[in-house]
Image: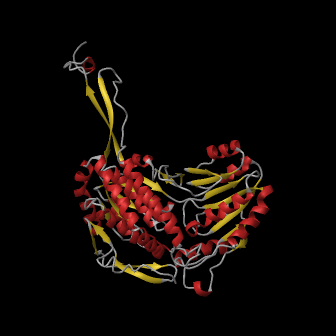
Amino acid sequence: MGNRFQVTDRFADGAQYIGGRLRAGTSGREHSVIDPATGESVYTYALASTADVDEAVAAAKAAFPGWAGATPGERSDALHRLAGVLAEWADDLARVESLQCGKPLKLTTEFDVPGTIDNTAFFAGAARHLQGQSAAEYDGDHTSYVRREAIGVIGSIAPWNYPLQMAAWKILPAIAAGNTIVLKPAELTPLTSLMFAQAAKEAGIPDGVINIVSGSGRVVGEHLVGHPDVVMTSFTGSTPVGKRVAEVATATVKRLHLELGGKAPFVVFDDADLEAAAHGAVAASLINSGQDCTAATRAYVQRPLFDAFVARVAELMETVRVGDPFAPGTDLGPLVSHRHRDSVAGFVERARDYATVVTGGEAPGGDLKDGAYYRPTLITGAAQDSEVVQSEIFGPVLVALPFDGDDEGIRLANDTPYGLAASAWSRDVYRANRATREIKAGCVWVNDHIPIISEMPHGGTKASGYGKDMSVYSFEEYTQVKHVMFDNTAVAAKDWHRTIFGDR
């Protein structure tokens, strides 16, 4: 196996980051971070307790007045410094992310880490542009304007599929707007979230502004979401867990942002560039071993291109190099855990009863037998209402289905509970534009699928949740809009008072 980062010494003090320092959790329970490529433990830590959550929230609450009172320029400068520290640590961040997730090193070095640095630099600039509506005299007697203000302590929960990027997506808009935060990463993958917090301290961001509690969702996550001093929760994860988060959050009447599951359609019209669509489908379905809520999962291909598309996608999938994430040339690493690999395999095995597995559909043996690997898989012949078409598999599995007219293609694309992302493939601008209007998703790509940029919002609709990560639109979640109105008349007895008392 390739060169791996030694994390034990880096986190010797524990996997909780509270008030500016690492410390051990107090739950009395331990958890191991497992390298999914080998099945071996690389770091064991004490899980957080509810008392640790209380301490982290208290640290964030104490830090809030000072951080919220800093000027936008001061917060911007701190985030620019943070981007610089992250850039200096890029190699270590990439190796730790690959170690805990099983991502190929080329993905973490060319996507996860650069994307996080760019996102940090974006919010460093955006921190200076928290603007409200321009002042005006709307009724003639008063001047009104709008302030955007930080709201307080944010309690967020990030998933295991993109630990570093999701930590950044939760932390950056919150603190750029002047809030403080307690983040709970997935207990499977806490390491790069802790490194992000350490980088923030190195950059001079005050202690308590960013806190990390590593613990279970049922105990630590629910306590964080329901904490009375937490004013807003941002959660990324599955739709069923998102529903539970919403129940807990609404009980304490706090703001809520949910980025949930997806089942992204990949709609190929009969005038599309077949080679581009096939390459795009393989890349978009296999990114991060398919563990991406925006990954292409349902390829709807107009019937004249269907057979050729299936043949070409299968051919390309068979060239994908499955192997050690740290080995040069590896395209596809393992899934995050053996348990999750078995879940993905279960979907495929059940599908054999009603569909055809064209390629893949198995775990490799040999040198990879101890890892949580699964081969790129293409399925055809499934019905629209079947499990593999309707349910989120979250693995390297693409289902291809034919359609006839454009109406049918768009209808099928919309025919799941989810609405996070989609793509349309066509050379006809009018056809593609119709698809972008009518497909119900938070993002629709045309002749591509997956690219994201810091300047544009990310978030879904329907069962995929609501609210936005990235971009200035994310500030809607993390700021309070306040109307301020000044009287300009200096008249004591105003005319409208007579509607309440006295005579005109």
Residue 356 located left or right of residue 437: right
Residue at the left extreme of this rendering: 492
Locate residue 9, reporting x and y percent.
33, 80
Res 399 quadrant in image: bottom right
Question: For the point 33% across and 36% down, which residue is it?
Answer: 146
Residue at the right extreme of this rendering: 304
Question: For the point 45% across and 55% down, which residue is it?
Answer: 258
Question: For the point 73% across and 50% down, which residue is it?
Answer: 408
Residue at the bottom extreme of this rendering: 366
Between 150 and 83, the one nearer to me in the picture = 83
Res 451 quadrant in image: bottom right
Locate residue 107, reporting x and y percent.
53, 68
Between 93 and 250, the one nearer to me in the picture = 93
Residue 72 located left or right of residue 471: left
Between 502 and 87, the one nearer to me in the picture = 87
Locate residue 97, reporting x and y percent.
45, 71
- The colour scheme of the drawn protein is secondary structure
Q: Quadrant of the C terminus?
A: top left
Locate residue 178, reporting x and y percent.
30, 50
Task: Work out whether 34 lies above or below 138.
Answer: below
